[in-house]
Image: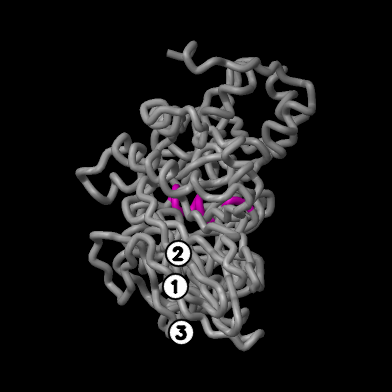
Amino acid sequence: MKIEQIYTGCLAQGAYYIESNGEAVVIDPLRETTPYVERAAASGAKIKYVFETHFHADFVSGHVDLAKVTGAQIVYGPTGMKMGFDALIAEDGQEFKVGNVTFKLLHTPGHTMESSCYLLTDENGKQTAIFTGDTLFIGDVGRPDLAQKVVADLTQDMLAGYLFDSLRNKIMPLNDDLIVYPAHGAGSACGKNMSKETYDTLGNQKATNYALRANMTKEEFIQEVITGLMPPPAYFPKNVMMNIEGYDNIEEVLNRGTQVLSPEAFEAAANETGALILDTRKPQEFAKGFVPNSINIGIDGGFAPWVGTLIPDIKQEILIVAEVGREMEIVTRLARVGYDHAIGFLNGGFDAWKNSGKEVDTIRTVSVDEFAAAEVADPTINILDVRKNSEYQSEHILNATNAPLDYINESMLKVDKSKTYYVHCAGGYRSMIFASILKARGYDNLIDVDGGFKAIKDSNKFKVSDYVCPSTLL
């Protein structure tokens, strides 16, 4: 038997490939099918099932395309949803034989109503692992407020109650030596307290995970699970519907998005379609020069979640400016979160645009030393801290205004077009996204602080606040 966790850092997502005696299953696959098909082909195995733990919100699963390519059967737990593709809706406790091992589906509603875990019994009849999806994470459990965005008569309190029962009745009675393989780790918006570890023993989780305390009442569980939940990214419900209804074939999406466009054709497409120009280069490269009205979301940061957070229309046509050779990667990562309407990329990247003599825009960037000198010269300068509110509350420059990137439409209301602002985040990634979006909307007086709050704090040139208890902010 072989168990392989295929972890994708950008989405903090774990898919799984399990193989036994010539047969294999894939659990919660990403959109692209090739990696799974190649794994099976390398050992001469046939993918028999695609097990889905639930209708995912933070990414578009590859279940539909993978089933078409391999002939595998898609399996979900009990659900009342009408799906746009063929799938086996399994019963609680139903077993599936794969080679010499067996999977048992455990229906564990709570994160969503169809949420299910897959309990693996090995060749010797020993229960060895459980694939918990978003029911149980390492250090946390799935947030219970997402399904209410899709099913109107559900509430987060109801779902949290179901989750309590699922954990107590289905998961906690299992053996302590079981290995827990969840669908997400630290950085995912599907929970609030996930560990950076991507698997653990169930026994250790019983001892350390706040949600599995043996003496916890249901009322205590509900309160602790829902406390501190931030609103989910706006694209989550749209991804859920794509996972339920189906989607365009991934090869069609990739072919459409990787159309090669000369600078002239790129400019014409931008003017004729109203496409958003997405520049995925490093922030400091973008600042030195970019196609006017483009926005910067760097491919080497939290790319897909920020795209989903900041581009409200999942069907928005997108034109791509990228480092040469990374175009396919970008279109693939867009498709992972449901942005299937990239329509081409700038051949030769930004250098081709600049060398063609077309108009170029820039964003001013200053070092921390230059920023400090400006603050000494004028202690009343405007400073925007675009980190999350929780980061700002922990520590921030005195007199800085918190304008979180993840609520950019509200944050924009704090900015006066006629005034100059110094903008920073934690390290420089988010501040350039913020500055680029506002620049595209006509805000020309934003100055990015290179290195962000880390560099600011390390410089010891600024007065930094101590922790501010949220209750004092009321």
Determine whether the residue tagged by mark 1 lies in a helix, strand or loop: strand
* Label 3, residues with CA under 10 Å away: few <14, some 14-19, many ≥20: few
Read off the residue under disc 3. Answer: 69
Q: Which of marks 1 and 3 is nearer the N terminus?
A: 3
User: Does residue 341 sit above or below 211 in this rendering?
Assistant: below
User: Does residue 389 sit above or below 190 in this rendering?
Assistant: above
Using the image, tell me which numbered label, if any, was put on residue 96: 1
Q: What residue type is labelled 2?
A: Lys
* Label 1, residues with CA under 10 Å away: few <14, some 14-19, many ≥20: some
Seen from this angle, which residue lies furthest front? Answer: 125
> How far apart are labels 1 and 3 at the CA level?
21 Å
Q: Give the range drawn in magenta.
A: 301-310
Q: What residue type is labelled 1?
A: Phe
User: Does residue 169 sit above or below 246 in this rendering?
Assistant: above
Read off the residue under disc 2. Answer: 104
In the visual, does 354 lie left or right of 149? right
Q: Residue at x 36, y 67 (%)?
A: 273
User: Does residue 228 sit above or below 339 in this rendering?
Assistant: above
